[in-house]
């Protein structure tokens, strides 16, 4: 069972998106997400203007990071580090 993601850990993830890869790797790991080798897709979502993040657990109990703009989920970072958009999830 995952511990709830702290606001500090979520803030650190957003800060790390503008930092070096090692910092983004560590921020993802602390939240229970396996970082991919290429962080560019995650970084591009986390550096959008007005972005926020929220954490939840999927049906298997693994962490999913939701990327929000204006309180609307625009993408989610899956436990394996892949990024899914709502449109891709329904296709």
Image (cartoon, rainbow, N blue to C red):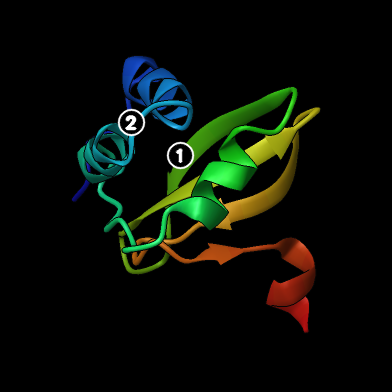
Give 65 or 49, whichever is nearer the viewer.
Answer: 49
Quadrant housing residue 53: top right
Q: Position of residue 42 (x, y in %)?
A: 51, 50
The crowding category of the residue bearing disc 1, from other C-alpha atoms within 10 Å (few below 14, some 14 to 19, many at least 20), is some
Question: As rendered, which of 8 and 21 lies closer to the eye?
Answer: 21
21, above or below 63, in the image: above
Please say if the residues under marks 1 and 2 sit with CB atoms less than 8 Å apart.
yes
Q: Which residue is drawn at 68% across and 36% down?
A: 68
Q: What element carries label 1?
A: strand
Residue 41: x and y, percent? 55, 56
Q: Distance between the residues labelled 1 and 2?
A: 6 Å
Residue that numbered label 1 is attached to: 55
Label number found at residue 5: 2
**What is the total number of numbered labels drawn onto the structure image?**
2
Residue with the most extreme top position: 8
Compare marks 1 and 2 and give the one earlier in the sequence.
2
Which one is nearer the viewer's eye here, 20 or 66? 20
Name the quadrant containing residue 23: top left
Give the SS element for disc 2: loop
């Amino acid at each position: 069972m995952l511990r709830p993601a702290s606001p500090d850990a979520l803030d650190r993830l957003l800060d790390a998106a503008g930092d070096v890869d090692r910092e983004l790797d560590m921020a993802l790991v602390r939240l229970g997400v396996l970082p991919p080798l290429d962080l560019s897709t995650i970084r591009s979502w986390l550096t959008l203007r007005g972005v926020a993040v929220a954490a939840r657990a999927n049906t298997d109990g693994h962490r999913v990071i939701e990327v929000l703009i204006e309180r609307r989920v625009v993408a989610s970072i899956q436990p394996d580090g892949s990024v899914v958009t709502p449109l891709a999830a329904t296709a």
